[in-house]
Every structure is written in C-alpha cells, then in structure tokens.
Image (cartoon, grey):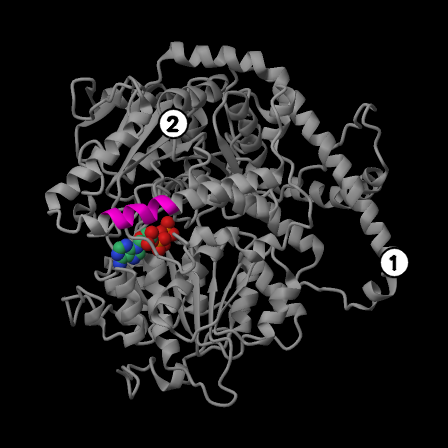
Amino acid sequence: MSNDFITTIDSDDESPNYGESSAPRGKTTAKNDDLDPDFEFDFAGGRETGLDLWGGDEVKGLKNGAEPINVDDIIARRRGKPLESYNDRKRKRKAVQEEEEDDEEQEEEDDEANDDNDEDEDEDMEDGSLASEASGSEEDDEISLDGSDLELVSEDEAEAVSSEEESNEDEEDQEDEDDEDEDAESSDDEDEETAAELARKEAFFSKDPTLTDDPTLPSTFAAMNLSRPLLRALTSLQLTTPTPIQARAIPLALQGRDILGSAVTGSGKTAAFMIPLLERLCYRDRGKGGQACRVLILCPTRELAVQCEAVGKALTEKGGLDVRFALLVGGLSLNAQAHTLRTLPDVLIATPGRLIDHLTNTPSFTLSALDVLVIDEADRMLEAGFTDELEEIIKACPRSRQTMLFSATMTDSVDELVKLSLDKPIRVFVDPKRNTAKGLVQEFVRIRSDDTRSPSLLALCKRTVREKCIIFFRSKALAHQMRIVFGLNGLKAAELHGNLTQEQRLQALNDFKAGSVDYLLATDLASRGLDIKGVETVINYDMPGQLAQYTHRVGRTARAGRNGRSISLVGEADRKMLKAAIKQSEADQIRHRIIPPEAVSLMSDKLNEIKDEIQDVLREEKEEKLMRQADMELKKGQNMVEHHDEIHARPARTWFQSEKDKEKAKSASKEAYVGSFPTANANGKDPKKDGKKDPNAPKRGKYDGLSRKAKRRKMAMEEDQADQQSSKSTALAIRNAKKASRPVKITEALPKTKSAPKKSSGKVGAGKRKSAFDDDKPSKKHEGMRAKPTKVNLDKKGKGGKGKPKGKR
Ligand SMILES: Nc1ncnc2c1ncn2[C@@H]1O[C@H](COP(=O)(O)OP(=O)(O)OP(=O)(O)O)[C@@H](O)[C@H]1O
C-alpha cells in the first residue's frame, strides 16, 4: 500500500449515510468514472429497475396456491401479535407501491412547476431531502471521516489486526511453503504472472485496436455509429456517455470480435455487451426461414439472468426494436419455456443447467443458428460444477459464433475457457490494477473469538448500519438463523439463498429494494452482478473463501460512481483473505473499525436470553415444513394414481451427466467456492458441533497444516468414502421421504432427521492451475470445439473486419 496511514474508527454511532459525508450525495458522479449514479434503466410499465420485474407474472405462476412459511409469522404468533396473512402482506406492499408511485407523480408535477429554479436551488433541495432522510437516525452523532473523532494510526499499528497472526503464521507457513503457491485461497500469488506467461498471453490475444490505432475512444454513444432505434433507446434512458468499458468494448463487439472484458463491479458491463448485440440484431435476416435463436447470454444465477433480460428488454422497448427474449432459468415453468422456444426467440438468457435441460429434452431446440455467445461472470462459470455444463453448451454452439466473456474478476482459471471458446480474442481490461470501485470504503472489524461474531453483527446493525444493507453469510443455514435473530430483535430483514423457492427469492429482493426490509441476509447467491440501487453498506459476517467472491460481494455497493462501504468481520481463519483484500485496495479505502466491547457484550447477553426462543422458532418452522411436505407427498400420490397413464406416457427427462457425476460436481463446486473454513452459527458456535466446541480453539480448515501429499491422500480417502456412502444416503433419503409422507401428529415428538453424510470430493482447483497458455496445442478433449470462423455472422457483417453492414443508417 502506498499510504502510511490507515484510519481507525473506534465509535460505531454514525449516520447511516456513511460514505456520502465527504461529498454531497449525488455529486460524486463526475469524479467516479463519469457515471451517473442516479441513472436507472427505466422499464415500461412503471418498473424502476430490472429487479422490479421479479414480482412479475411468470413468478406468480409458481405459487401453487401455497403460502410460503414465514419466520416473522412464527415470531409474531409466539409473541401473541396479530398475524398478517400472505395476501394482506401482498395487499400492503401493493398499497405502499401505489403510494410511492403517487408521490413520485406528485414530485414530478412539482418538479415541472419548478422548472424555472436554477441549479443551485435544485442542489439545495437534494441536500434537504438527504437531511430529512438522515434524520431517520434521530439523535445519532454523525462521525466525520476527516474529523477529530478519528484516530490516525500508522499502518504498522493498524495492522496489529494481524500482528500476532503473522508471527505464528511464519512457523505454519514454513511447513506449507510449497503448498502456498498452489493454494487457491492464498490469493497473494493469484494475480502475479511471470514474464513468460505474459508473453504467451500477448501472443494469444489480438492487439486491441482501440488502444493502438485509435487512441481516442468514442465519448458519446452517438459517436459509435449505432442505428437510430438504439440511439433513441439510449437517449430516452438518458444514457449519453458510455462508461470506459462500454467505450472500448462496444466498437470491437460491433466488428464481430471475440472479447474478454473486465472492469470493476458496477461499471456497466451488462450494457457493454447488450448494446452491440441488439445493434447486430437490427440487421438480422428477417426473410423466410430467417427466424432463429441468434444470441445466447449465460448467467450464473437466476436473479442475474432476470436482471439481464430486464436491461435488454428496456433497451428494446424504448427503441421500438423487434427483438424477442426468452428467459431459461430454473424455478420457472419448463413447459412454458419449451413453448416459448418453439417460437424461436432472438435472444436466450439462461442459466447453464436449465439450458442444458432444454437442449437435452425439448424437441427441435438447438443452438445451431447461434451468432453470439455471451458468458457473464465468466470466472464464476468456471467454478467446478459449472465447467462440465459450460463445455456441453459450447459444444452445442456453432464454431463461427462471436463470443464475449465478461467479469469484474478474471482469474487465470478463465484461461482454459478463453482458449476453448474464443477466437483471436481481444482483452479489454479497464483499469486492471483496480479491483474495487473508487467510491468504496472497506472497513475491517477484528473478531477475536467466534462467540463475539453474532453479537458484533447485532451491535453494528442496532447502532450503526440501520438500513439499505446486504449481509453476506457463508451458509444458508446461518443466514436463516440470523434472520430469526434479527426478527426477535425487531430488525426488519429478508433472506436470500438457495433454500428458498424462486418466489421467495424474488420477493425478498423486491422487499429489500422497496425498503420494506432494511437488511438482506444473503449467501453468495447474491454476490454476483446484482444491481440494486441505493445499497449503502455490505457486511461480510465472515470472509468468503476466495478473493474474487470478496470483490463481488463488496461490489454490491458503490456502483455506477456512487459511494458505499463494506464492513467485514475478520476472525483468525480469515487472515489470509484480509491480507489479500488489503493488498488489492488503495490505502485510503481501508479502515479499521472497533466496535465498543460494552456494545458487543450487551448483545451477547441478549442473544443468550433468546437462545431457546431461536431453537423454538426453528422447531416450529420445521414442524410446519414437515406437515406441508406430508401434504404434498399425499397430493403427489393422489396425482400419480389419478393421472398414472398420462404421467407414464411422458418421455423421461434426461441429463448429460449421471446422477453421481452431477452430485460429485455439485459438492466439488461447493467445496471450491465456499472454501473449507469452519463457520460459526448464530450463537457463535460451529453448527456441526454446537455446544461441544471449545470456544478458544483456533479455527482451522480441514486441510490446514497438512503437507501437500497428506492433503491429497486425505482428499482421495474422502472421495472413496463419499462414493460408498452415496448409495447408503440414497436409500436413507428414500426411507425419509416415505416417512415424511405419513401424516405426523402435531403433539408427537418430532423424529430426529439424520442429515445425509456430507460428501467431499476434495478441494477442486486448490492447486495452481496450469495456465492454458502453457500448452500450445488444444487439449484432445476440446479438439474441434472452436475452429477458425468460416462464415460472417448476421448478414455477413462483423468478423473479418468487414465493418458496418450495408444499408445501415
Ligand atoms: N453509460 C452509462 N451511464 C450511466 N450509468 C450506466 C451506464 N451504463 C450502465 N449504467 C448503470 O450502471 C449500473 C451498473 O451496471 P451493471 O450492472 O451493468 O454493472 P456491472 O459492471 O455488470 O457490475 P457487476 O460486475 O457487479 O456485474 C447500472 O445501474 C446501470 O444502470
């Protein structure tokens, strides 16, 4: 780090509008990449951003009439408060939404009436509204970041956070010295490339003409020679100035070049690929037989796919373009999607699993006419578990397609995918030295014992971070438990993770976005790509297993030129990640926060008081779930009897992997992505050994301290065990399902459900991957997957430097 000082924040009482204090809110735009922080894609039908789409019709269709189990209801019931029915809640939400819309209309009218006001007056009004917003914090003392409340300590002192750690570390590291290089979690070496590697990459990638031939990048969209409808769309969305990644990637994409694009989170990468592909679709063949699925955008999560579709649709609708989209994600009706696919939509936006399901099971659906493939969050797609699916999809695409890969983080793992799928690609890396947004302040809180983690989080949320906050957890169970803790402490929170139905996931996002809850308790499901306006704080309850995850998590705030902050609770086991996070940031972005110990111990007492109640709520919820499950099984059985012939006449769905392969890939992905750190539960204990664990025991990963050889041996043994156990667990799962289908007496003590033995196939990708550039020849496995382009895409435009299509403009 270049600076010698790190700020220490030793008070946690402050205004919730943190990070905005140094400059008036909304005035930071020009400084940060010239983005307009207040810009939003304006969606027809009153949608404010893509996320609003998530309350849409398709999602309603998922409900099956069953109201989701809500822990807030259980808490209200226990406390003797009146219960709100699901429909009441929905009605309420709608009323609030309508009220907001009315207010907005009123504001617009007022604005129009005040058209004569000069700029200064507008600024005053903005500040005024901010002041009233901030007054929500009532008697809070605002702490000024450059004020006397702050103590400046030298970096050495501040890094006392990890001083003792480092002395121990030296000893430990001695043993593992060789392993260090290979450790995927040790990101120290992650971005250091040797001169030879760099030279090989240099030779592989084509030169970026925007850097060499023409150093002057287009400063407006109008200067990009886009077609009129698209310019109209951009203008009506008040998008005039391209972001740096857009200025560089769009002209290249319009030439049909393959692109590997990277820029910090929140810098407009979605529009960087969406604009050129819509432009190219304007010139597609519309003649007889011309209708085809021409563009495929792959996203790692359903939410991201929905958001991406919303951006595409906004541009299409505003420009009056004749482009049809299909959303192919899990959790939505397969039949409805298959039906849409038969109409040959122009753009498919999909998650890999559901796309493969359709490729395998939807008759006549192919990707043979595909012209453009976009892989968003490319490095995430490379995580184990997705890799096989990705290969399968790429195999199904024509070789002559254009391919674009985008992500804010590009690790060397992307090399393989680049070599596999890109042809003479151009690396478009904007500000590659910068990994986090300029407006992001990163705070770190030292957690000495895991017992204080949950109380520290509660203290933070009770005293400092009161709204617009996403909190990331390493596990779904923990996020859920914390939701109960928040509910019992009167904090309004929603949860977002893979244990929820699609409807619940979308509802949680909508509630958070609408401000009806102040906290979104999420797993890494929400860490990638989600663009929620106004998120002020991101809290890491625990540090993630990989640096890229950290970068994406904290990237949910400080987007599009805004300011924001992240607060990470850093325990013993997180020290490597802390060092890596600090190393990739500017010193002036880093703060050391101290939560007053009295506040932590107060919250600790509170947590102890409600410990039993948390368990009671969890038990009640489990009982309710079991009853519903039994009900469902019963209905399923009845359906099987009633519609036996029809059901058996349907062709069985198939998959490109066996169940075993699928399961293996899934657990490998989990292991690699989540990491092998132990995680404390809401009571500060290890969930697997709750109550029995020595609280003073240092937190260690299961492979920590092992030599490379011992680590591999352990992983191999675990794999063997997992294989043996998998048949046992299947039998157990069948038995449990049968048991669950029997009606359960409410008064009867609940049967203890044994969780299926955890499978571990070892840490995939733990070793340093051999760079794809080390090997000059493509691997046999992928031979032929990517050949030289043989045809010019989209009406002979694009590749081969043919430039713009004829008849354009
Ligand atoms: N040219 C532009 N001018 C102003 N704002 C823009 C422009 N392009 C995009 N934005 C806004 O920037 C925000 C972030 O965009 P987007 O979600 O595409 O970022 P991203 O780079 O993909 O982020 P992540 O890496 O987290 O996925 C969006 O709210 C979008 O409306």
Q: Which of 506 and 173 is in front in this view?
A: 506
Label 1: which secondary element: helix
Q: Which residue is drawn at 29% across and 46% down?
A: 107
Magenta-highlighted residues: 102-110
Q: Position of residue 772 (x, y in %)?
A: 42, 61
Q: Which of marks 1 and 2 is nearer the N terminus?
A: 2
In terms of image quadrants, where is residue 129? Answer: top left
Tell me the residue that label 1 is attached to: 642
Residue 498 visible (yes or no): yes
Q: Where is residue 633 in the image (x, y as percent from the top left)?
A: 80, 45
View extreme (right): residue: 641
State which image quarter holds ligand 1. Answer: bottom left
In terms of image quadrants, where is residue 366? Answer: bottom right
Q: Which of 118 and 705 is in front in this view?
A: 118
Residue 548 vs 745, above or below: the answer is: below
Residue 769 vs 498, above or below: the answer is: below
Amino acid of disc 2: Arg
Q: Is residue 173 left or right of residue 672?
A: left
Mark 2 CB in 8 Å range of ligand 1?
no
Q: Residue 466 carries which label?
A: 2
Q: Which residue is drawn at 46% across and 67% down?
A: 420
Label 2: which secondary element: loop
Residues at marks 1 and 2, CA–CA distance in whole angstroms: 53 Å
Q: Quadrant of the C terminus?
A: bottom left
Instruction: Mark 1: give few (<14), some (14-19) or many (20+) Cα within 10 Å.
Output: few
Residue 763 visible (yes or no): no
Q: Where is residue 470 in the image (x, y as percent from the top left)?
A: 42, 36
Amino acid of disc 1: Glu
Q: Is residue 61 magenta?
A: no
Q: Which residue is drawn at 52% across and 55% down?
A: 56
Q: Which residue is drawn at 59% across and 53% down?
A: 60
The rendered magenta stretch, by its main secondary structure, is classed as helix
